[in-house]
Amino acid sequence: MAYNDLVADCLQNEPAFCTAKCPFNLDVRDFIGKLQQGRFNIAYKSYRQAVGFPGIVIALCGEPCSRVCILKDKGGSASLKLLEKASQDYARDTAPDQYNMPAKDKRIAIIGGGISGLACALRLLTKKYQLTVFEKSGRIGGHLHELLSPEIFMDDIRSQFIHEKYTLNLDTEIVSLESLDFDAIYIATGKGGNDFGLSLSADVAFASTKDGVFLGGSLSGSDTMHAIADGLNASNAIETWLKTGKMNHTVPAGGTRLMPEAVRPGESPAILPYNGVSYTKAEAVDEAKRCLKCSCDACVRYSPLMGYFQKFPKRITEEVQVTIQPSSLDGNATLATRLISTCDHCGLCKEVCPKVIDTGDFLLQSHKAMREKGAMPWAFHEFFLRDMDFSNTEAALVKPPPGIITSSYAFFPGCQLGASDPEYVTQSYRFLLKHFPGTALMLNCCGAPAEWAGDEPLHSRVIDNIRDDWDKLGQPVMILACASCKLMFRKHLPEIKAEFLYQLMADKGLQLAKRFTETTASVFDPCASRHEIQVQQSVRKLALDAGFTLEPLPLEGNLAGCCSYGGQTAIAHPPYAAYSVKQKTAQNDHPYITYCSNCRDIFAAAGKPSWHILDILFGLGSETRRQPGISERRNNRLKLKKKLLNEFWNENAIMENPIDKLFVSAELREKLNKEWMLEQDILIVIGNCEQSGEKLFDPEAGTFSGHMNVGNMTYWVEYRLTQDKVFELVNAYCHRMKIEEV
Amino acid sequence: MANKKRLLCFKCNKELELKKTDFSYLGHTFFTEVPACPRCGQVYISEELVKGRISEVEMQLEDK
């Protein structure tokens, strides 16, 4: 089904179960929300507006809501009736509102002075229609006399009609409608009463088969509560007739499509009134707070993006659509650009949605559309696309297995594993060659950054290159170390059979350098592993074999959340990335075991002790190892390439490490990392200043400064040359705005 | 890099003077006065300007 159709099917605005069951369709979420805040007066007004006669309804309502309350087996249904009474008891002012409106000239007859007729009369009177009630007996109230003491219901009726005037004809039996000269008639003559030979129209609410004549209440078989509700609702049908001359008023179908699984109640014992009869204010508020105000908000609760923005799929769709197809005067309003670029594409929104609405994919397609029309700011993804290019050029390496011509397998560690620690890759490759000697090597990026940037042509080129390399190697089975790579392969290279490194490790077993007994940790499943049950189990097996005690996380397995790396949102929306990582690291106090190097490094940067499973298996970094900075990550990839060539193919690659010529203080390095400025680029800028002489001199500080475009970004550097021919960086910063130099 | 520091163009050995300079981002253009060499036009943008007004306008244009 198309995304727009799915969103139309979204359950966000479906009524709560109790509301759907309520004869008056009381908006319980709204009513309870007010009580939760102790706002009894306003809660009572909402209630009165919904039921017409609050005193009578409180006295007689059979609480059908309690039968469908989601808390029924979790401590007891919410006591709505007692809460309704509390709203009445503690309302500051229970007098009905007085509406100062001009009188209308339309005249309406109500036949039957029972509660349904009175409800209809009350609603029409507040709209200032002229009302005449005909009652064949000598009293109003109808069948309520059989159910309640007249003191209770007459008091309520008097009270609700206090501001309204109407003509009441008691002891007046209408035997024929022909004798009545009115603009509309509501017949509510009670159970077994006179229907004047009319019947209800099949598809129009309360309409009889005669124009301008309506039927309802016990006459139509309604019980007391529905009879009141009929009167209130019939007033709307009558008004439609009076305004349009058409008998076409419809009432919503009722019911709810809300699914019980969308609401996950905890145990919560019902609050019982201390006096056994009615709540105190405090008791009422406590009971109101038990109410879950059932609604389908799974996406907003789980998806970090929807939770951060507090936006449901419908709102997101609207904002994104006006962004892609702007209708503003200058045709250039891009309301949701940043929202589109904030999605980490973790897939959790779709996973938790009972209607399987895939907002993440919608945002990905929207991102593509924005990029195609050149409306997506280049700055959001340029750093990551340049990084991907680096991985696929300078740091890339595609080699058949050492000493073997045909490849049965190819190890594809992904671009960031070796960037985090080159040993992750070299040790894994040693392991693979020991067990699977025909394993080739492919140091590449899987193209995820291009997909996340919405750059389809670039993404296709990356995918085509991977396919070409794979073909040249003889179409081996890929061994992957990164769940995101696996997802990308499944999506874009389905012809390539791929397995996880960790599954092979769990199968073959490893000789551990260290055991971790008496250590409790939690496995953090990367979001891309959501449906990779086998690798999730393999990693847990490896951790248990290493001696760990494992504690589950709220977000794991099919509910795995993104560490904040996905979608590479850190430049487009830094506060969101910080929010998302905090949400993930705060799940418990145990250190995490990850099997995605991005998760590990992001958690390490956030101060959350985390191992990569390869740290544990090969005795590498500790759980508190500092995450490498962005420049170090590039160096690590070059070091890795050099080491692999040397160790496995006996090739001595000469790779200069230019940033050895640059001195950067630890403090400044931290700043460069935060601002996504590479030391490699800074050295190029300095080199350009030195070569061209286009630089400025600060005689006081003895420093030079200059600028240059790196990609689309303008880099500024301030530096001095030290005696040992090393450039000391004094400061650096960058901006996205381009200087239009003459 | 303080805004008011004395800077010389290395090539021209001239002290920088304020000069109207054009900038562009995401299809929009603006101008402001920044220090520049009176002879060759080489400009200087301070970190203060970058972190202040420039970054503010960049954000506004991205969210426009």
Image: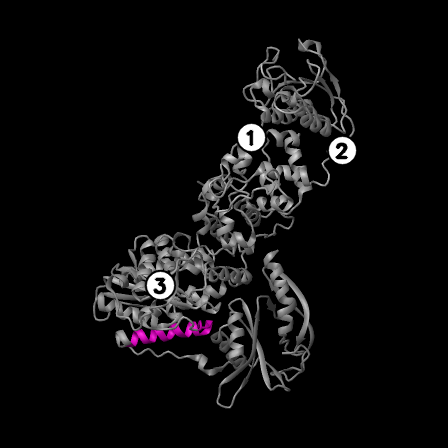
Pointer 1 chain: A
The kind of secondary structure element at disc 1 is loop
The kind of secondary structure element at disc 2 is loop
At 36% from the left edge and 53% from the top edge, which residue is drawn?
Answer: A492
Residue A49, image quadrant: top right
Q: Position of residue A87 (x, y in %)?
A: 65, 39
Could you give the CA–CA distance between mark 1 and mark 2, rounded to whole angstroms? 30 Å
Front in this rendered view, residue A90 or A174: A90
Dot 1 surroundings within 10 Å: few (below 14), some, or many (20 or more)?
Answer: few
**Which disc number belongs to residue A98?**
2
Is A642 magenta? The answer is yes
- Which of the marked residues, 3 or 1, is nearer the chain's N terminus? 1
Which segment is the magenta one? A626-646
Give the position of the N terminus of chain A as an image quadrant: top left
**Which disc number belongs to residue A549?**
3
Which residue position is annotated with label 1?
Answer: A62
Whether labels 1 and 2 share one chain: yes
